Image (cartoon, coloured by chain):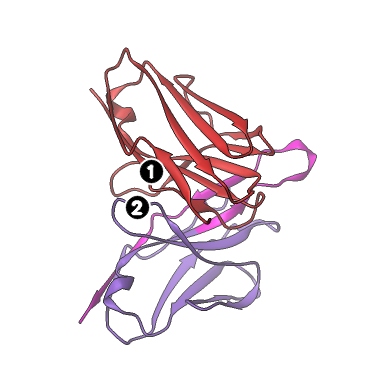
Chain colours: A purple, B red
Amino acid sequence: LAKTTQPISMDSYEGQEVNITCSHNNIATNDYITWYQQFPSQGPRFIIQGYKTKVTNEVASLFIPADRKSSTLSLPRVSLSDTAVYYCLVGDLVLSGGSQGNLIFGKGTKLSVKP
Amino acid sequence: DTEVTQTPKHLVMGMTNKKSLKCEQHMGHRAMYWYKQKAKKPPELMFVYSYEKLSINESVPSRFSPECPNSSLLNLHLHALQPEDSALYLCASSQALTYEQYFGPGTRLTVT
């Protein structure tokens, strides 16, 4: 099972770019990398997903090096409303041969954005 | 409609009670999930349904019993729970396995 490691917390100021790195040294060939955001007392919200190289959407970018042993979530120009916990997930729920897949949330990075 | 709804929002139950949590989505998603989240911890996957069949059971105690009556509904039946089962129970759905998941707001469960 791929285990992920993230910084426990990060601080930033409004308007800055924030990069959160997740380590997943034993990622499997079929595993995807997904990031979620969670506010207190709410369910997680999908941010971005990737398999390799770089993925960009309207809210974030995800950088994955060739060896896929880490990934970096990049949030451009954060605002106060980006204060939340950010989770890195690695896993695959679809395995061949009848094996059961798995999806494990990292421990999360608490991002605090200050004015 | 991109919403996953969960009822009830809060539930307090005794250790001898039987209760059910409900989850509903109308996005046409064919995968649905139950997670358990303790305070200040990440969500832990409990069950996964794919095309209304139980696909993954993460060795969850039998006092938790999932049910998927149709592609839009997911239930979690609770019986003889322990105080340590108190947590936020999250439901999610996705177009299929490996696609991004949409989470509901959760049910805050307290077992007394």
- Find the magenta span and give its range: A89-115
**Residue displayed at 61% across by 58% down:** A27
**Residue displayed at 58% across by 58% down:** B100
Pinpoint residue A52: horizontal percent, then vertical percent: 65, 71
For label 1, the residue is B106
Which element carries disc 1, helix, strand or loop? loop
Pinpoint residue A17: horizontal percent, then vertical percent: 38, 84
**Residue displayed at 63% across by 56% down:** B99
Q: Residue furthest right?
A: A97
Q: Tell me, for residue B38, which label it has, or none.
A: none
Q: Dot 2: within a 10 Å radius of its alpha carbon, few (fewer than 14), some, or many (20 or more) residues? A: some
Q: Is residue A90 above or below residue B6?
A: below
**Same subunit, tags 1 and 2:** no
**Residue displayed at 46% across by 78% down:** A74
Pinpoint residue A83: horizontal percent, then vertical percent: 29, 69
Which element carries disc 2, helix, strand or loop? loop
